[in-house]
Amino acid sequence: MNKVLDPNRPKRTVKSFASRVRLTPKQKLALATYRPHFVVNNQENEVRFAELFEKSAPTVIEIGFGMGNCLIELAQSHPEINFIGIEVYLAGIGATLAAINELGLKNIKLFQGDAVEILKNQIPADSLTAVLLFFPDPWPKRKHHKRRIVQPDFVDRVHRCLLPGGYFHLATDVADYANHMAQVVNSHLQFHNFKKDSHDLQYLGRPKSKFESRAKRKDCDITDLVFVKQ
Ligand SMILES: C[S@@+](CC[C@H](N)C(=O)[O-])C[C@H]1O[C@@H](n2cnc3c(N)ncnc32)[C@H](O)[C@@H]1O
């Protein structure tokens, strides 16, 4: 007998992440204690950054911050900037909450969830100084390339959220993904390549991470791509 499919069933969408849920006791404790203070509830409404941070300041988002090392380092060295981290990985959220508390950082908030949805629903248009995407999952098998987060729709969403003159910094240690990123962002007509000297926004660069030593071990290069919203 043929199955009758419900036309109202939710569409299955391709996700750029796999689910993992193993937490250390420290991460569990940090989640239980600090989540209400630093993790924004998922909602349909856009957030107001000045209310969220109780302070108006340039705002930067890091997408897929993993265990939070870059996010924490940037927030520590730039107290004049508000940072938002978006991550699906609960252990990473727990580890980052523990570090935020240990260092007494006031300029970080976190979102737990799919950045593709959060950019669309919760981040206002023309609001961000920079969007950082460091070492996104490369999904190396060809049949999994559709799971790569860098896709035309995603780039549109990043572009919508950036201020004019704001920048999008991507980094990867996978040559094939670097080509894919360059191709997708270059075909977005309202992004152009960043030139350090002709840019007046503060460029934050990228803190060194475990990917530097990993690239050295594997004898491969890290590619940094930076694009500016026209
Ligand atoms: C390979 S890790 C890199 C982590 C970190 N950026 C670093 O440099 O160490 C990629 C991270 O992106 C997260 N991620 C993947 N897709 C995501 C999405 N759609 N929204 C939020 N986070 C995502 C994964 O959970 C994972 O922690």
Image (tube, grey):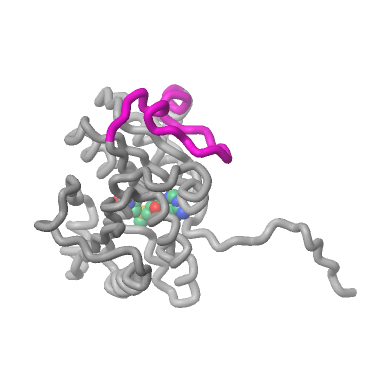
State the residue in front, 125 or 40: 125
Q: Decide which of 133, 136 is in the foreground and name it.
A: 133
In the rendered image, residue 190 lying in the magenta stretch gets the answer no
Q: Residue at left 41%, top 44%?
A: 86
The reply to whether residue 207 is visible in this rendering is: no
Q: Residue at x 37, y 43 (%)?
A: 127
Classify 123 as above or below 103: below
Q: Residue at x 48, y 56 (%)?
A: 17
Q: Where residue 62 sits: x, y (%)? A: 33, 46
Q: Does the magenta-highlighted stretch encompass residue 43?
A: yes
Quick one: 55 or 132, which is closer to the camera?
55
Classify 65 as above or below 3. above
Horizontally, is 228 left or right of 40 in the view?
Answer: left
Q: How many marks?
A: 0
Q: In this view, which residue lies farthest toward the right?
A: 1
Locate the C terminus by quadrant: bottom left
Q: Give coordinates of residue 126: x percent, y percent.
A: 38, 47
Residue 3 in sight in this render: yes
Above or below, 83 against 188 in this view is above
State which quadrant residue 197 falls in.
Answer: bottom left
Horizontal side, residue 85 vs residue 31: left or right: left
Dividing the picture into quarters, in which one does residue 30 lie? top left
- Estimate the x, y position of residue 9 in percent, counting from the top left: 75, 58
Residue extending farthest to the bottom is: 142
Name the residue rendered at 23%, 52% in the picture.
Answer: 210
Q: Position of residue 88 (x, y in %)?
A: 47, 46
* The N terminus sits in image quarter: bottom right
Q: Which residues are magenta?
A: 33-57
